[in-house]
Amino acid sequence: MDTQKEALRRIISTLANKNEELQTFLETVDTTLTGLQDESWKVTSELEAELERISSALEEKGAELRGAIKEEKQRKEAELQKQLSEGKFALLSCEELLEFANRTLTITNEEEFLKAAKQIKERVTMAPAFRLTTRPAVSENMSQFTVDFSVERAGLQRLHFLPVPRAPEIDASSCVVCDNTVTVAWQLTGEVVDCDSGSGSGRIERYELEYRKTNRDSSLTAAGEACWEKIHNIRETQVTITGLKFDSRFVIVRVRARNKAAAGEFSEPVAIETTAYNFGFDAATAHPELKVQGDTVTWEPQGVKGHDPRLKGKENKSSSRSATPSPNKTAGSRAGRDRFAGESYTVLGDQEMSGGCHYWELRPLADWKSFSVGVAYRANLGRFDQLGKNAGSWCLHASQWLQSSLAAKHNNRAKALDWPLPQRIGIYCNYDSGDLSFIDVDRLRLLHSFKTKFSQTLVPAFTVWCGGISVTTGLQVPSFMGKFLSTNQSLSNLSQ
């Protein structure tokens, strides 16, 4: 019976996963259909606009050529009209002179004849007919305006859509995950070039990469478009994604090429593993006077000054919270048997460590006075226990109350560390090898290393008194840890 129930539960889980996958797939198809309609309208509008620009260019060029022909025609007409007018005037003058000469031949008086002959001779010398050229100034030939647009027509007939680049192929073996960055490399499966025009309009100009986080490496293509982060204008065949918090198992990446105006299809998505240690504060364990908010813990005394012996008889004028209880938190609302109490201003992390390597960082807030950070056996830490004062907790303690001090603590023993108070502390825990190290990240200095053998599951542990801290999780073990681990540097080791 139990076996059948367990088998049925597995079937139900499989069906539920498939149901979710199908729902995601249908949403993707619906989104793609809507996108197809929008994209079709867009490219059709762009085509019409481009054809309109071609038509306008042809009209402008036609008007220019027609204008040149008209201008030359008008110039020649003017020349010929001028010759025509001058010729008519010369003909009329020549006809008058011819008639006068014929009349002169009929004169019988010698003196009158000689006088008339002399006049004729003088008039002939000045006659327009004898000074006018009898060849047209211009010809009717207009062959200089002959056109042949056969090449251009052929070019217009070859008009087609811009060649679209093929989808690149992500080279998974060349992708590198390091220090919370992901370097993605890809290869071209074939670059399309517009050979007809020779202009290389199909040449790939840039790439676009999209990525998103997920906890599943299956159904990579059934992902909504809205959740992709985008990187544009990539000129090389690789890019490094920075500023990542590794709070998911995988980062899915895809890339596409773009030429002068068209973007190709995306490559097949590739899931790159991005495992890291993620945890939050377990608010159920927090001391009643600790306020947990996101990745920050602050100390907020609940209106009873002198509750802690270190505050008796002292006025803390630098903190406006020291005598004012939080309006959102009361002793009643913070009650709970799992909470730390008394002078153990402690809160634990909510994710256990039972193997492997883990890394996170801590930053003290501006008004801090004292804090501790480390790891502890959750089961061995009582409500009133303080970090580092029993065999089940290891910590780094920092204080600037009255005087500055830095110490490593374990099993009620402390080792003072001669180093300035760090503003960014890295905590490295290798459960399997029993290593716990504290790093001054800003100065890349190993502050202290514990070497032990962990026998129970661990949780991150924090103590805050006066002020607050913030933690950063989702971090890979940074590459600089290799220097400390390979050289086995440490300031001291505390035996159990």
Image: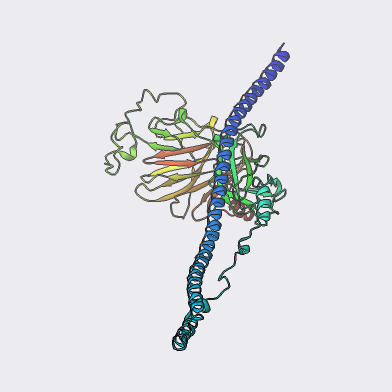
* Type of colouring: rainbow
Quadrant position of residue 172: top right
In this orientation, which residue lies closer to the viewer: 155 or 35?
155
Q: State how many labels appear.
A: 0
In this orientation, which residue lies closer to the viewer: 273 or 298?
273
Is residue 260 shown to the viewer in this render?
A: yes
Is residue 359 shown to the viewer in this render?
A: no
Residue 232 pos. (x, y %): 56, 48
101 vs 486: above or below: below
In this orientation, which residue lies closer to the viewer: 38 or 479?
38
Residue 219 shown left or right of residue 278 in the figure: right
Residue 3 pos. (x, y %): 73, 15
The C terminus appears in which quarter of the rendering? top right
335 vs 486: above or below: above
Quadrant position of residue 265: top right
Q: Residue at x 53, y 32 (%)?
A: 378
Residue 168 pos. (x, y %): 68, 46
The N terminus appears in which quarter of the rendering? top right
Q: For the view shown, which residue lies furthest in the top direction? A: 1
Residue 493 shown left or right of residue 85 in the figure: right
205 vs 122: above or below: above
Q: For the view shown, which residue lies furthest in the front direction? A: 108
Residue 413 pos. (x, y %): 49, 44
